[in-house]
Image (cartoon, helix red, strand yellow):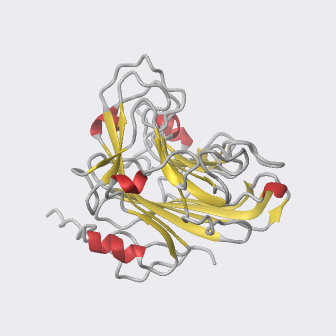
C-alpha cells in the first residue's frame, strides 16, 4: 500500500505572521497590505522604482493579510522587466550590520506557471539583493554618497543563475582585494565539477547534472531545490560577518533555507568561512537595505513570451533565526553556527 503523505504544517495566517513579527530580535516587518507599504522613491527610506512594468499591491493574491507585492513581467521587456521594491532595515537607519555581527531575512514568494515555464533569452532572474544601507541625510535630493543603489561591494544576491531552475547565491558587485566581483557560492568537488547548492544531500546539486541530456538537476537523479508554481514558498538568508580587514570581512558565513508551502524549510546553501567584500574601510558600509525584484540580466527585449507574475509577502528582518510560517509558536531552531 502507498504510505499516507506526511502531515502538512499549518498554513500562514495574519496571526502567524504577526507572531513572527513580534518574536525577539525582529527589526523589520512588511506585510505588503496597502500602497503605503511600498510608497516612496529612490532616496526615501523605502519605495519602488518602475521598469517596463511597475510594482503594485495585489489584494487578490496574498500569503496573509490584505495584499502582497506583485511584479508583472511583460512580453518584449528588457532586463528591468518590472522595476523593484527597496527598504532599509529601520526607519531611522539605526539598524545596520557591519563586522562581527549577523542577521536573518525571511520572505515568502510566489511564481506564476507562465513565469517559471518561460525559457527567457537572458542570463537569469534575481529574487533579492541584500546590500549597503543608506546613511543619515539620504533623501531624493541628497548628494552622492548617502544613498546606496543595489550594486554595492557587499551585496548578496539570490538568483536563478543561467535559468537552471533553482536559487543560487553570489556576492559583491565590485569584488575586493582577494575576492572577485559576482563570486558564486559554488563548492568544488573535483577539478571539473562543483556543488551549486552545497547544503543539499546526495545525490547533491551538481554542475555536471546540467550537462546530461535531459538535465538531471532534480530528483531522483539530482537533488537541487527548485521553484514551484502557484504556492507560497519561504526563503530565509543568514549572514554572519567576521572582523573587517581593509575592504573585506574575514571569516564570514552565509546560509540559505527554502520551504515549500506548508512544509518545513530545508538547508540549501551553507557557505563559509569565506572572505566577504566590504567596500572601502573609510566608507564604513554596512548591510541595511534589501531589494525585491525579478530583474533578468541581459534579457532580450525582442522575445515574445507569455506575461508572467511574481509575488512577495511577509518580509521579516531579525537578529535571530525566524520560524517557518505555521510554526511561529515553536521555538526557532538554533543557528548552525554560534
- Asked if residue 302 can be seen in this view, the reply is yes
Q: Nearer the viewer, residue 147 or 63?
A: 147
Residue 67 point in image, percent of width and height: 28, 55
Q: Quarter of the image holding residue 42?
A: top right
The answer to which of 19 and 188 lies nearer the viewer is: 19
Left/right of residue 184 with respect to residue 77 in the rendered view: right
Point 44% across, 43% down: residue: 217
Would you place residue 292 above or below residue 336 in this image?
above
Residue 132 to residue 322: above or below: above
> What percent of the width, then of the height, locates residue 325?
34, 69
Residue shown at 68% from the left, 71% from the top: 101
Residue situated in front as seen by the camera: 155 or 240: 155
Q: Is residue 196 left or right of residue 265?
A: right
Residue at 36% from the left image edge and 61% from the top image edge: 31
For the N terminus, the image quarter is bottom left
In this rendering, is residue 299 above or below 238? above
User: Could you tell me residue 127's position as x and y percent?
Assistant: 47, 46
Q: Position of residue 204 (x, y in %)?
A: 50, 53
**Height in image: 269 above or below 330?**
above
Amino acid at each position: 500500500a502507498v504510505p499516507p503523505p506526511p502531515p502538512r504544517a499549518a498554513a500562514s495566517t495574519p496571526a502567524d505572521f504577526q507572531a513572527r513579527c513580534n518574536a525577539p530580535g525582529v527589526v523589520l516587518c512588511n506585510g505588503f497590505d496597502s500602497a503605503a507599504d511600498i510608497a516612496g522613491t529612490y532616496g526615501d527610506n523605502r519605495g519602488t522604482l518602475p521598469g517596463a512594468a511597475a510594482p503594485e499591491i495585489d489584494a487578490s493574491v496574498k500569503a496573509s493579510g490584505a495584499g502582497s507585492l506583485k511584479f508583472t513581467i511583460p512580453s518584449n521587456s528588457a532586463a528591468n522587466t518590472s522595476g523593484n521594491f527597496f527598504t532599509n532595515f529601520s526607519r531611522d537607519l539605526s539598524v545596520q550590520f557591519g563586522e562581527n555581527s549577523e542577521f536573518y531575512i525571511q520572505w515568502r514568494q510566489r511564481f506564476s506557471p507562465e513565469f517559471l515555464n518561460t525559457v527567457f533569452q537572458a542570463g537569469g532572474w534575481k529574487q533579492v539583493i541584500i546590500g549597503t544601507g543608506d546613511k543619515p541625510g539620504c533623501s531624493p535630493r541628497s548628494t552622492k554618497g548617502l544613498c546606496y543603489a543595489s550594486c554595492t561591494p557587499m551585496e548578496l544576491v539570490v538568483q536563478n543563475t543561467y535559468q537552471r531552475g533553482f536559487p543560487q547565491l553570489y556576492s559583491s558587485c565590485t569584488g575586493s582585494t582577494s575576492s572577485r566581483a559576482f563570486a558564486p557560492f559554488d563548492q568544488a568537488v573535483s577539478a571539473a565539477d562543483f556543488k551549486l547548492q552545497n547544503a543539499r544531500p546526495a545525490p547533491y546539486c551538481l554542475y555536471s547534472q546540467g550537462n546530461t541530456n535531459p538535465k538531471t538537476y532534480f530528483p531522483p537523479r539530482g537533488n537541487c531545490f527548485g521553484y514551484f508554481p502557484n504556492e507560497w514558498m519561504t526563503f530565509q538568508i543568514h549572514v554572519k560577518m567576521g572582523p573587517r580587514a581593509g575592504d573585506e570581512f574575514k571569516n564570514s558565513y552565509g546560509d540559505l533555507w527554502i520551504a515549500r508551502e506548508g512544509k518545513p524549510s530545508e538547508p540549501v546553501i551553507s557557505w563559509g568561512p569565506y572572505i566577504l567584500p566590504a567596500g572601502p574601510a573609510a566608507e564604513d558600509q554596512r548591510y541595511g537595505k534589501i531589494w525585491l525584484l525579478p530583474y533578468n540580466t541581459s534579457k532580450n527585449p525582442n522575445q515574445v513570451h507569455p506575461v508572467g507574475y511574481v509575488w512577495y509577502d511577509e518580509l521579516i528582518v531579525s537578529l535571530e533565526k525566524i520560524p517557518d510560517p505555521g510554526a511561529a509558536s515553536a521555538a526557532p531552531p538554533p543557528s548552525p553556527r554560534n
